[in-house]
Image: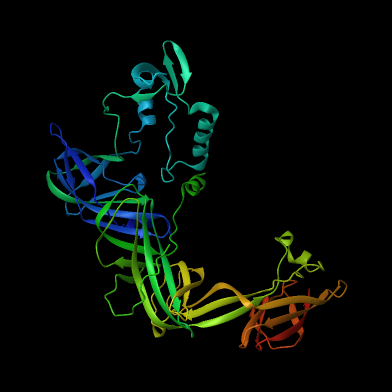
Amino acid sequence: MRVYLLSLLLLAGAASGLAQTKSGDKSSNSHDDSAALTVYNQSFAVVRQTLPLDLKSGTNQLEITDITSHLEPDSVILRDLKSGRDLRILEQNYRSDVASQGRLLALYEGKTIEFLVTDKDGNRRLMPGKIIRSGYTPHYEAYSGYDQQYRQAQQAYVAAGNGEPIIEIDGKLQFGLPGQPVFPALSNDTILKPTLSWLLQSDRPGNTNAEFSYVTGGMSWHADYNVVAPVSGNLLDIVGWVTLDNQTGKTFPNAHIKLMAGDVNKLRPTEMGMADANGTLGALRMEAAAPAVTERSFDEYHLYTLERATTLYDRETKQVEFVRAAGVPSQRLYVYDGVKIDQNYRGYPMENIRDMENFGIQSNPKIWSMVEFKNSKENHLGLPLPKGRVRFYRRDTDGQLEFTGENLIDHTPSDETIRLYTGNVFDAVGERKRTFYKIDRNAHCVDESFEIKLRNHKKEPMEVRVVEHLYRWINWDISKNSDPFNKLDSKTIEFRVQVPPDGEKVVTYTAHYTW
């Protein structure tokens, strides 16, 4: 997906402050509370709003101050919503250097200001001092377009001591501020909020509405799922939440919010430079209710729409339920993947591994507990599920909910099976031991045998899926085996065996490799 498609998918918005200046007129502000947002699960959003404009024929100057602190200036789109008007942006300027002590010190470099100091007797007085160097270095945001090399250079500049101010007092220089700086009134070069200003060209005067859209960072969303199992049995109750996190520096009142799920290709600043050179459990009552979130396909992704307009405050985390299902059939799986690869062998090619007698002989004793269910309408689901954290709970005999594990799911289409690892089985262990290894380099073959023991300390039988990885070479054959097996892929086999209560099951096999 090409990056410019983001400009074609501008489905989001926020309230903005608009100051419009005409020749000889005073500035006026207009606010549009009709907001729309499309939030992507990759820490960015697209904002869209409608701006009422009162234009004159020719050039017009406009300023917008109620925008996010992470706006991407080169993503801005402004277009007339009324047909027939020729509206063009002749010039666009974006400033994010809002007033701060460091910024004001930089503005007054070479000038004398007053500092509020406290003497040894605790008396406070004003002392004049000349700012030789402010030490101010702008904080370049991740979305400002500056590459990593430039930001590292700025950090090195500060680390070298250049970030410390130098003040002249009575003809002598000192590092650091002598006291609290007291600045004169703000100048025209100072802004209190990020500001976007335009020089617009209109072919005729009059009122019009324009669509103002842009991409911003600082906004994200993710999904969380709470899964509750009964005291006994495997019918699950599932509640899914979407959690929105607004760190944009702006509040969006009465926002119409959409959530885009999928892996949209979004370049980061470093990539652009290279191209150029916690959920809440919630009640689990299953009464019918109107959905708070609806879903539909959009291009190669899925779009979730919050049915009610809501205010999303700056620095706020908001949660909305989007899926609820009761009585979802599931299956408990036990998997034993006994091989434990020594980290020292990571990255070795197969040509070397086949000659290493001690490769793959370490054993993992843990048997995994996994839960599997199908995301289908027959199972009361069938909604494309965005990636997120899944927390599992089971009711105890006293009715209390006990946490039993958690994991992550990826974007999951409908009618796909979800299988999640939830933890290790307490009352069952596995043991994997190699019993034979022989290499014949003249005949270009290796024979290797293993014995896998499964011990069940439960009072009921267990079906365990024993997974074995054939890592010696791509050509292999199982010459001996104690139990039937399934071939999962070109290098993996699986034995499904029954382990009796308070009993043991032994699985053996021999693999013959050739090259």
- Count up the numbered dots: 0
Locate residue 299 relative to residue 421 in the image: left or right. Answer: left
Would you say 174 lies left or right of 59 here? Answer: right
Q: What x and y, as percent, mark residue 130? A: 39, 17
Q: Would residue 421 be seen by someone viewing this image from the given angle?
A: yes
Instruction: State the residue at coordinates (42%, 23%).
Output: 177
Q: Quadrant of residue 178?
A: top left
Residue 9 visible here: no
Q: Position of residue 396 (x, y in %)?
A: 47, 79
Q: Nearer the viewer, residue 280 or 270?
A: 280
Q: In the current view of this chain or complex, which residue is farthest to the right?
A: 442
Extreme left residue here? 206
For the rendered model, the colour scheme is rainbow
From the viewer's perspective, is residue 277 above or below residue 111? below
Determine the image quadrant of residue 414.
bottom left
Q: Compared to 209, does 431 lie above or below?
A: below
Q: Position of residue 379 (x, y in %)?
A: 41, 83
Quadrant for the C terminus in the image: bottom right
Q: Is residue 329 left or right of residue 199?
A: right
Question: What quarter of the picture does the N terminus occupy?
Answer: bottom left
- x and y percentages locating residue 211 in the rendered image: 23, 52
